[in-house]
Image (cartoon, grey):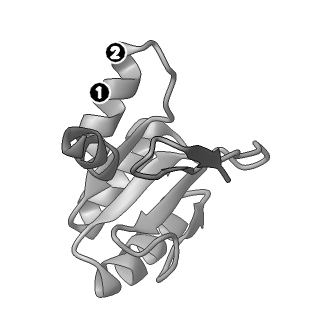
Amino acid sequence: PVEAIIATEDREIFNAKLTEINERIAEGYPASTVDDAVAMAAKIGFPVIMRAAFALGGLGSGFAHDEESARALATQALINSPQVLVERSMKGWKEIEYEVVRDCNDNCITV
């Protein structure tokens, strides 16, 4: 249903859905100013990953190890996007992503 698509596209709704089923998520916050981004990084604790929102991981993203690097990354990210996402660093972890495609006959494949 359309509600499921909306839930996966809205970070806040998606995180709430994962919390409902007791699935752990990395701590993270959106920020719209450099000062807010630096404050969120300090709240989470360094290192953090900072990503320009709505940019699929590009446009000024990177790891911040201290306030100076957080300020530089946030400044760069906010040139390209109205928001920067500040998240706990998961560096060294592996990510596995599945995409499920279903047709009108209810046939499914996972890629």
Q: Which mark is residue 27?
A: none
In the displayed orientation, state which residue is furthest to the bottom: 79
**Labels 1 and 2 touching (C-beta < 8 A):** yes
Q: Position of residue 16 (x, y in %)?
A: 29, 27
Would you say 82 lies left or right of 106 here? left
Q: Which mark is residue 20?
A: 2
Secondary element under disc 2, as helix, strand or loop, is helix
Q: Position of residue 86 (x, y in %)?
A: 41, 53
In the displayed orientation, state which residue is furthest to the front: 105
Q: Residue at x 45, y 38 (%)?
A: 44
For the residue pair 18 and 57, the one nearer the viewer reads as: 18
Three-letter code, disc 1: Ala
* Picture quadrant where residue 96 is located: top right
For the residue pair 19 and 109, the one nearer the viewer reads as: 109
Would you say 20 lies left or right of 110 here? left
> Could you classify mark 1 by the number of other residues whose Cα lies within 10 Å: few (under 14), some (14-19), or many (20 or more)?
some
Vertically, is 86 above or below 78? above
Would you say 89 lies left or right of 44 here? right
- The residue where tag 1 is placed is 16
On the question of residue 11 being in view, the answer is yes
* Picture quadrant where residue 43 is located: top left
For the residue pair 74 and 19, the one nearer the viewer reads as: 19
Q: Position of residue 7 (x, y in %)?
A: 27, 41
On the question of residue 98 being in view, the answer is no
Q: Residue at x 24, y 37 (%)?
A: 13
Q: Residue at x 45, y 66 (%)?
A: 51
Three-letter code, disc 2: Glu
Q: Residue at x 65, y 44 (%)?
A: 90
Would you say 92 lies left or right of 73 here? right
